[in-house]
Structures are given as structure tokens and as C-alpha cells.
Image (tube, grey):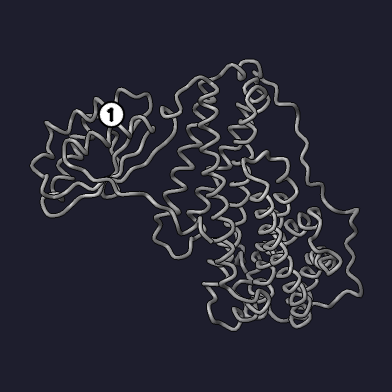
Amino acid sequence: MKKQKTSSLIKVMDEKEIKEEFLPQLKNATKNIFGILSQFNSKYILPPRELSFALMKEADEVETFLDEFGANQNKRFFLFREMVATTRWFNFFLFQGLHLYARIKHYKLQITQKEYIEFKKDLRKNLIFAYKVIRNIGKKLFEESESIGLKKSKNYIYSETLFPQIQRKILPPDIDEEITKEQEERIFEILIKYLNVCEEFNLFLCYRQDKFLKEEPIEKYRSLFHQLESLYDTYIKNTNYEIEISDFQKIRGHIAVSWHLLEMAKALAHFYERHIEKLSHSEIYYKIIECIGDEKKIRDIVEKFSLRYALEFSLKGEKICERIFSKMGKKPEDFLVDTRILIIPSHRVEDFHIRPIMPVTQIANKHHFDSFLYFNRKKYNLKSPIEIAIAIPDIRETLIKENVQIVIQGSLSAVNEIVEFFKEKVGAVEKILKCENLLTK
């Protein structure tokens, strides 16, 4: 039997194939995005959410189409592809912000009227900037489409009647509804998870080493706040607790605002990392920056707007939790998360060994929730005699040479007792935690 010749799965197109096959497909793939971009004009100070939502869908599809054909590796089509990507990420920032701008009054936030006005003003200013960037990029895309041989249609039309529906309809989530309403313990777990996420987010932002945050850590906290929103909607929303204690709805609002702000931060951090730093000072970099104005503006929006306000709202949410615990007949100090830094002086090394330190596990075990000791990026559960028995020699080894810094984290009541224990036993001195780099403009 004659063996059939097989062809490669990938074939590099020649100029004829680009002209006769690829460009007609690209024209068809981009007709909607050009139609939408033609609506991004001075008629609007800010565009309708529906218009931004439509652009989000089309930009994603066009970028995927271009990548499937290898445009990210082709000199002729690379700039066109980068401009589509720029449109996509700035519009993602814009859409999340437009949603937040429209919904902010419904979130029952724990802020003053002055803070509300200031936040909306800052939000609006940054949305106008993003909208301006998209309009600038849109003009360049029209120009670039002609230079790559994409024949311009006489008139791009995208009717508002064709806007995709933003709102998603679902069936009533009523399975085990009555059982869920009685799960007080689950509600406490969610609130405690929220407090832990807020505390971790606060410490991370205050003591991070990066000058400008990358997408990866922002995505971590974006995902955590998104999970919290889902947990709230599953186990707390529409329960008797939410009806009787209005502060629950405020917690929901603070979670939602932090999540949307982190979505916005992630979009610009992704764009900056993948499309600014990667192309730094190339010809294409300058063409994209021409549409933006200044790359520093992107960093400022991420740092001084999105992350700053996300941190601010999370800190305010902690205060709301304190009230909820009191209203539910619980001691807030048994639930609120606290983090303290202690410096143990080197000259007290002889006091730092197993016998005098092990009683700290008894203190930790008096409290319902776990407490932790952090040293040299290692985490030890203070309730565990085994883990503390491992930690003590490690700390002592360093203490022989120099002062040692440890971090204690847990419920407020537990941390207070543990800190006093270390002060009494080994002369520990507390280092004051401060977060000034984001909460000041």
C-alpha cells in the first residue's frame, strides 16, 4: 500500500495568501469593532456601559483571531495587534469603572458624603482618561488598518439596538434556603475570612518590595475578594441576619467596591507589564504611548487610585465587622484580626529557649481561632507545641548574632495576650505598624 504524504499542521502564508485569504477574514473579523469604535466619539463624556460591554467582547475576539494567525510574530501586523490589545485592556478598566460608577449609590458604603463625592470625582476623572485613550487608539487603528492593506468600508455602522445584553438572568437560588438561613457558624466563617483577607491585603500593600505591582499579586487579591462576594451571596444574602442587621449589606458593598477596583488595577497592570515594559522604547512603544500621553499615568492610576481606594474600603469594612459581632452578641476582640511586630533583643538570648517559651501554646489554645508566628518567611501555628518546638531553635540561632523580628497574627484578644507574654519573658519591644504609602495622596 502506497504511503500517503502528510502535510504540516502549520503553513506560512505567502503574500498572495495574505491578500486573498487573510485580509478578507480580518476585515470580516474587525467590522464590529470598527463599528463600535466609531461610536466612541465626543458625543459622550462617558460612553454607555452597553457600548463598553460590546467593545470588550469584540476586542477579545479580534485579539484572539490575530493571535491564531501569528500576528504577534509578524512585523506588518504586530502594531495593529498591539493597538487592539491596548483597546481591550483600557476598555476592561473602563467597563469595570462604569459599572462601579453606576452602582456606587446602591452599595450602602460606610463613608461620609464628602468621601463619597471625592471617590466619585476621582473615579470619573480616571474613566474619562481611559475613554480618551480608547478614542485615540481607535483613530490610530483606523489609520493602521489602511497601512496593512485592510480596505476601509465606506461607513461602519454599529446600531445601539445590537448592543449585547449585560444583565444575566438566572433561576431563583432557593435550594436549602431555610437551612442556610440558620447557619450562624457559616456566617461567622465568612466574616472571619473577610477580615483575614483585609488584613493580608493591608500588610501586603504596606510592606511590599515592588515599586510597581505586577499583575500576579493583584490577581491574587482580586480573586479573594471575588470569592468573598460569592460566599456572601450564597450564605448571607436574603437571610434573616441580613434583614435584621443592616451592616451586613454594608459589608457586601465594601467587598464589591474592593473587587471592582482590583479588577481595574489588574487590567492596567496587565497592560503595563505585557505591552509597555515588554516593548519599552521600541518604535511601537512610542506609538502606543502617543495615544496614552505618559506611562507614569498608568502607574499612578493603579497605585494612587485603584489600590488606594481598595485598601481604604477594606479598612472601613473591618470597622463594620466589629459592629456586627457586637450586635450578634459576640466579643469583637475574639474575631477581629490583628498583626503585631515584635523585636526581641539579642542580649535576651538566654531567656529564649524551650522551657520559658512553650507556655505560649497554652495561651494560644485558650482562644477559638488559630494564632501564628512568622519568622524568616516561615509560618508557625502557635497552638502547636511541635511547630513552636521547631521555631524556637531557628529563632534562637539568629538571636545569638543579632536582634530578631517576629510577627504575631491572630484574633485581637489572643494577640494581645501573646504579645504581653513575649514582652514579659524575653523583653520584646513592639514595632509600630504604619501604612502611609497608599493612604496619603
Residue 268 placed where, x, y %? Answer: 59, 62
State whether residue 230 is above or below residue 363.
below
SS category of the residue bearing label 1: loop
Tell which of 294 and 338 is nearer to you. 338
Asked if one can make out residue 22 in the rendered structure from this viewpoint, the answer is no
Residue at image location 68% in from the left, 25% down from the top: 238
Residue at image location 54% in from the left, 81% down from the top: 281
Residue 396 placed where, x, y %? Answer: 14, 45
Residue at image location 62% in from the left, 22% down from the top: 241
Tell which of 197 and 87 is nearer to you. 197
What residue is shown with label 1?
383
Asked if one can make out residue 63 in the rendered structure from this viewpoint, the answer is yes
Residue 420 placed where, x, y %? Answer: 25, 35
Q: Which quadrant of the rendered structure holds the N terminus?
A: bottom right
* Quarter-of-image position of residue 154: bottom right
Q: Which quadrant of the rendered structure holds the C terminus?
A: bottom right
Residue 419 placed where, x, y %? Answer: 27, 37
Q: Identity of the amino acid at label 1?
A: Lys
Tell which of 347 and 93 is nearer to you. 347
Residue at image location 62% in from the left, 56% down from the top: 264
State whether residue 88 is above or below residue 20.
above
